[in-house]
Image (cartoon, rainbow, N blue to C red):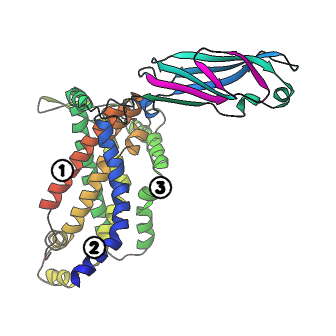
Amino acid sequence: MQRREMWLAYLMLAPTFAIILIIVAGPLLANFWISVKPVQLADLRPPTVLVNERVRGRPKAPGDEARLEYRLRNSSQDEEIRDVTLSDVVPEGFTVISHSESCSLNGAKMTCDLGTVAPGWRGDVKLVGTVSEAFLAAHRPERASEPVITGEANNVLTNFDFTFENFSRIFSADEFWSVLRITFYYTIFGTGGALVLGLFAAQLLNTSFPGRGVLRGLFLFPYVSPVIAVAFTWVVLFDPFSGTLNALLTKMGVVTDPINFFGQRAIEFSFLGIPMEFPLALTTVIAFEAWRYFPLSFLFILARMQSINTDMYEAAEMDGATPLQQFWYLSLPQLMGILSVLFLLRFIWTFNKFDDIFLLTGGNAGTRTLTVDVYEQGFALSNLGAGAAVAVVVFVVLVTFATLFIRFSPKEEGL
């Protein structure tokens, strides 16, 4: 009985599992498939023969001569198309006198055997004949039936020829390792900054004071605002020519020349006689990331704080524990679980973040991450295979990180 009920439950849940598998695994498998193929942006449309049918000769009276022309071309510049045939129905009122040698007529049915056409091939098929009143009375009579083109071509998207050239190309490029390093730098500090700001905000608003509800709502502004609006605001505020921040820094004498926060790659300085560089544009983007997404951490941490029993705080206060000691030894251990979950989620989301960086810097000035590289490879360079290969690297890195993090992440006390 128990076994039958188990199989019945599996059977009832099977459609749900299948839908989830298709939604999740379908695009993932397609990305893996494209990553091992030399797919260009133009390869998304399979090679085919394009045809344009038109009437030439401008007949005006019955019995006038006219030509029915089919102009054809191979849409691919790299692949030939084999066994190409063109078939169509001759328009009513058009009497064929002569036609191309590759064509044959069976009543009003026309069939043309064009054989194999080379890459970039262009050609035409012509029918010469006379027209009747029915042909002249019809509007665009040549479009009464659509010509049908058939043929076979090698489609790089569907064939079974695989190559690791895309991975070899991206791994051998020096810029890939620089982009990977920048991605980790951006992800770790952006995630950490959002968590720290969220923790401080939750600690501040966990106490009762007048206007606390209004302040909590204001703290959500960065997260609920459209990203394009807040990104544009930051670009305007940090603009080196008309930005508010640069105007304040210049008026106060902090800097002599305006600073291009989103356009300057680094600031050189010396520390103990050692020349060093501070990544200015990347740090500014990280600050935006932490500012924009700290409200999410703030909400989760605040909800967890409010569920903690306050009796132990009263006991600790009676024992003489300072607020910092209460936070470190009582609050923080209780928050480790939610902080771990938030760090994992924010790490994955930040690692995959594209819109923030693209809107702020376009990936320039040392802010190019792997997701921006996917866009650059796939669309700017029209190399979808290389873009998919970079996306596979992103997937592998995140799966590896998530697995290790879940295995070794700290848990709340008592769990």
Residue 226: x %, y % from top left: 48, 52
Image quadrant in which the C terminus is located: bottom left
**Nearest-to-viewer mark from 1 and 3:** 1
Q: Amino acid at mark 1?
A: Thr
Name the residue carrying label 2.
304
**Nearest-to-viewer mark from 1 and 2:** 1
Secondary structure category for the residue under label 3: loop
Residue 400 is labelled as 1
Depth check: give the residue in front, 5 or 222.
5
Quadrant of the image occupied by residue 379:
top left
Magenta residues? 81-107
Q: Taken as a whole, is the magenta stretch helix, strand or loop?
A: strand
Q: CA gap, disc 3 to disc 2?
A: 25 Å
Upstream in sequence: badge 3 or badge 2: 3
Q: Amino acid at mark 2?
A: Arg
Name the residue carrying label 3.
225
Q: Amino acid at mark 3?
A: Ser
Secondary structure category for the residue under label 2: helix
Q: Determine whether 231 is above or below 271 in the image.
A: below
